[in-house]
Amino acid sequence: MLAQLQTAVSLIYPPRCITCGDTVESDFGLCGTCWRDTSFLGGVICDGCGVPLTAGGQGDVHHCDTCLNAPPPWVQGRAALVYKNTGRKLVLALKHGDRQEMAKPAGLWMANMMRGTLAADTLVVPVPLHWSRLLKRRYNQSALLARSVARKLDLPWCPDALVRTRRTLALEGMSREARFKMLDNAIKPHPRRGAQMLGKPVLLIDDVMTTGATLMACTQACQAAGSGSVRVLTLARAVKDA
């Protein structure tokens, strides 16, 4: 009976591409055109920030020049998509377009980047929004992604282990130095729930990494709470030539 009902619903409301709305075979999927326009990250990537690299060097672990010259405070960084074309559309729709359903497929793509590499007690923690921005937007897109990733990897998660203590300006368009200055001392462990990070490895979740300033501030807050090693995972990674 349930199968018949699902078939009837699919006939009335056929699955649509989450980006362009064209008909697809299954829910929360991409059509062929949008799939081709989505740059999934893989192959040779920087182990520190997830940026794609040209083939070369020895061994399985590679680092970009930025991470070699200024190693990030986390031990590993990954992203699922390059922040361009469909990848950019997905991030903006989730972040500003109230397309909360996109967190489900995005969480799967992100989880696949970390599958088999995390300890069972790793705590999944999203980058926080300031309460005033959360009130206006009604949801934290990073928390939606964190919940989806945690479910896919069967890991515990805490949506408010970190808090943003003051409202910062939008970072888009700012220089690297200005971003770091803006976020100085702006993110801290939650007075109570931050204790959940004590002694545990943490997987930080955000929608996109550009300079990494936000994730660095969050990593420092996790470490201030006494966390174990920190890894970062984002839906998309900004690339200079993208």
Image (cartoon, rainbow, N blue to C red):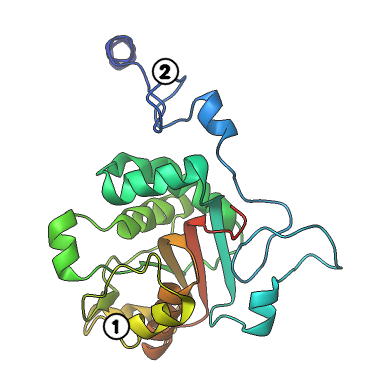
Is any part of residue 217 visible from this angle?
no
| Measured Cα–Cα span from mark 2 to mark 1 | 44 Å
Q: Could you say which is closer to the camera, residue 20 or residue 222?
A: 20
Q: Residue at x 25, y 67 (%)?
A: 129
Q: Residue at x 45, y 59 (%)?
A: 208
Report if the CB atoms under discs 2 and 1 are less than 8 Å apart: no
Q: How many marks?
A: 2
Density class for disc 1 (Cα within 10 Å; few <14, some 14-19, many ≥20) is some
Quick check: 214 above or below 238? below
**Circle 1 sits in a helix, a strand or a loop, which is it?**
loop
Describe residue 8's horizontal placement relative to residue 21 as left or right: left
Q: Earlier in the sequence, mark 2 or mark 1?
A: 2
| Tag 2: amino acid | Thr
In this figure, which residue is indicated by the disc labeled 1?
186
Residue 107, horizontal then vertical, whole percent: 44, 49
In this figure, which residue is indicated by the disc labeled 2?
23
